[in-house]
Image: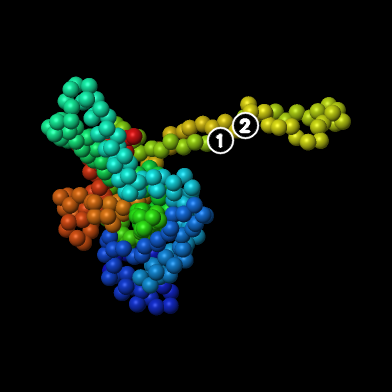
């Protein structure tokens, strides 16, 4: 039986829990939490997930990742982003785009005396369809990339869950007119992937350090932080002159916002960098896995299914490979 790492077995029935754990295979969905994406404050029922994981013999204290997962996905701006990027909204946008483009090209064609001849109308329709299809393909391609607003925000939660052999991923769907967020808990023993990536990073540090640096520099997010201007605290000479009510804040004294580039995989020991890479790509990998979008031609390295590539293959193909293209550049 493989080493159990940080996963804790259910204490009262260790044999039963061990047998359940040994039945699990990499990529197996343990449970899915669903939540209606409404305007009201919402929270995941992580207690239900904890119970479900315990039935598999995996005990993960909710406190270890609750704030990380909820702050990553349930902030109002992230929930709005999920709604605006849902498939029905994109479809509606494509329909509006098609109508506008068709009308524009048709009205332009009138100036060139094409009139309403059927060939002219057909030409206009073909042009509008091809432009709309291009737009839809751009949207689809964009969706396949690691999503800074959802996938990468799960990096901290996945970093905490790695040692429990659990990865989180998020998808969204629409049921009726209601947007629904789905949080996936998937079993993954990542030690083999981490070992492969550790060796890969160590090798690149020796022979291709500049390439490694340039690739990892793509894995960054822009963060906005507040900076309070350092105002000297001056005691007034005469306390009687001190106003009883605080004066309205001077606009120039409001906290200034500054943007910083935060590197998701900073320079560290190879093993630490490998674990961070897996944590950063964990959400993206799970989203592609549960929506059957993983490339199948790659074969497999550390999963049980020969058609499903494992996380280290995805990371190697997109970031660490010698011929890969800029991936997360926006
Ligand atoms: Zn692997």
Residue corresponding to mark 1: 226
Q: At which x and y percent is residue 190? A: 31, 56
Q: Which sits in the foreground, 131 or 290? A: 131
Q: At which x and y percent is residue 60? A: 43, 64
Closer to the observer: label 2 or label 1? 2
Mark 1 falls on what kind of element? strand
Q: Quadrant of the C terminus?
A: top left
**Would you say 317 lies left or right of 169 here?**
left
The colour style of the image is: rainbow
* Spatial separation of the CA atoms under disc 2 and disc 1: 10 Å
Mark 2 falls on what kind of element? loop
Q: At which x and y percent is residue 291? A: 27, 55
Q: Earlier in the sequence, mark 2 or mark 1?
A: 1
Q: Residue at x 24, y 44 (%)?
A: 316
Residue lying furthest front in this view?
116
- Label 1 environment density (alpha carbons within 10 Å; few <14, some 14–19, many ≥20): few
Q: Which sits in the foreground, 60 or 107? A: 107
Q: Quadrant of the N terminus?
A: bottom left
Residue lying furthest top in this view?
112
Residue corresponding to mark 2: 254
Q: At which x and y percent is residue 22? A: 29, 70
Q: Residue at x 33, y 49 (%)?
A: 88
Q: With respect to residue 200, does 115 lie above or below?
A: above
């Amino acid at each position: 039986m493989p080493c159990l790492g940080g996963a804790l077995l259910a204490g009262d029935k260790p044999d039963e829990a061990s047998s359940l754990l040994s039945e699990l295979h990499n990529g197996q969905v343990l449970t899915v939490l669903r939540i209606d994406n409404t305007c009201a404050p919402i929270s995941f029922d992580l207690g239900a997930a904890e119970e479900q994981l315990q039935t598999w013999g995996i005990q993960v204290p909710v406190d270890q990742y609750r704030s990380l997962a909820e702050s990553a996905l349930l902030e109002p701006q992230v929930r709005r982003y999920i709604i605006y990027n849902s498939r029905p909204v994109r479809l509606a946008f494509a329909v509006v785009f098609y109508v506008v483009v068709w009308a524009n090209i048709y009205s332009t064609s009138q100036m060139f005396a094409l009139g309403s001849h059927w060939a002219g109308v057909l030409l206009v329709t073909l042009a509008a369809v091809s432009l709309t299809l291009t737009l839809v393909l751009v949207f689809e391609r964009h969706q396949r990339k690691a999503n800074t607003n959802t996938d990468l925000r799960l990096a901290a939660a996945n970093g905490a869950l790695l040692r429990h052999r659990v990865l989180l991923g998020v998808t969204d769907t629409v049921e009726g007119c209601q947007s629904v967020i789905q949080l996936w808990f998937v079993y993954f023993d990542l030690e083999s992937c981490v070992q492969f990536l550790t060796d890969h990073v160590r090798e690149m540090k020796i022979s291709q350090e500049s390439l490694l640096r340039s690739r990892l520099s793509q894995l960054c997010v822009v963060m906005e932080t507040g900076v309070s201007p350092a105002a000297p605290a001056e005691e007034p000479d005469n306390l009687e002159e001190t106003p009883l009510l605080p004066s309205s804040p001077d606009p120039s004294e409001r906290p200034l916002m500054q943007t910083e580039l935060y590197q998701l995989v900073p320079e560290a020991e190879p093993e630490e960098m490998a674990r961070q890479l897996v944590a950063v790509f964990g959400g993206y990998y799970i989203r592609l896995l549960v929506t059957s979008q993983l490339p199948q031609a790659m074969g497999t390295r550390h999963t049980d299914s020969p058609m499903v590539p494992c996380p280290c293959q995805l990371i190697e193909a997109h970031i660490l490979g010698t011929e890969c293209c800029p991936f997360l550049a926006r």
